[in-house]
Image (cartoon, grey):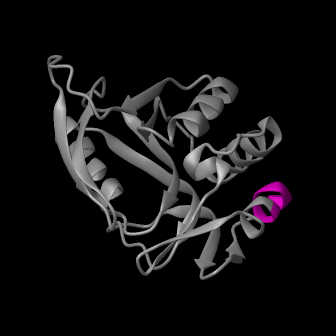
Amino acid sequence: MLERLVKSLESCPIVKRGEYHYFIHPITDGVPEVQPGLLREVAIAMIKVLDLDGVNRIVVAEAMGIHIGAVISTLTDIPLNIVRKREYLLPGEIPIHQSTGYSKGELYLNGINPGDRVVIVDDVVSTGGTTRALLEALEIAGAEVADICFAIRRGEADIGRPFKSLVTIEVTDRVQVIDRYL
């Protein structure tokens, strides 16, 4: 399993921004195109590794978690909550300040209730900044986080709790998959 993901990662383009080697991939960037087979492979693999027992919400952060979460939601019939970059001012909205190795910004959590049992899925984890902030917001909302899974882990990400990733990569002038979950 994960042959499409591994092959696509190991052949994806690299762009150097300063000293940072940025890999460009359909799962993490949505370009040049997201092939259905690749997206299906990632979603099915996540369903296999996630603890979905009693989960009543899939939580994703805008933007690149949306496509993965939507497929998982469709396959499992578990509702999807998207943490958005836009404020809606709904009752109970929780603002989240997130900071990663390459960006800072505000996100907004809506639709999570005390006692909800959720999983977080996302495209990639590198610094863990977005996920740490999201975990704090979910705690404020009174939700229980059953599990967390990323399609791709880059580097020594620390989110303050255990998580799963389908593959772990190193990036230099190319991407090398150094570990896989399945």
Residue at position x 20%, y 26% in the image = 87
Residue at position x 56%, y 48% in the image = 29
Q: Which quarter shows the C terminus?
A: bottom right
Magenta stretch bounds: 1-7
Residue at position x 50%, y 23% in the image = 79
From what the image shows, is residue 7 above or below residue 176? Answer: above
Could you say where residue 72 lies in the image, as x and y percent from the top left? Answer: 63, 34
Could you say where residue 133 lies in the image, as x and y percent from the top left? Answer: 25, 53
Is residue 3 one of those drawn in magenta?
Answer: yes
Of 34 and 41, nearer the camera is: 34
On screen, residue 13 versus residue 117, left or right, reads right
On screen, residue 99 versus residue 24, left or right, reads left
> In the figure, residue 4 lies in which quadrant?
bottom right
From what the image shows, is residue 80 above or below residue 132? Answer: above
On screen, residue 156 versus residue 77, left or right, reads left
Is residue 6 one of those drawn in magenta?
Answer: yes
On screen, residue 166 versus residue 80, left or right, reads right
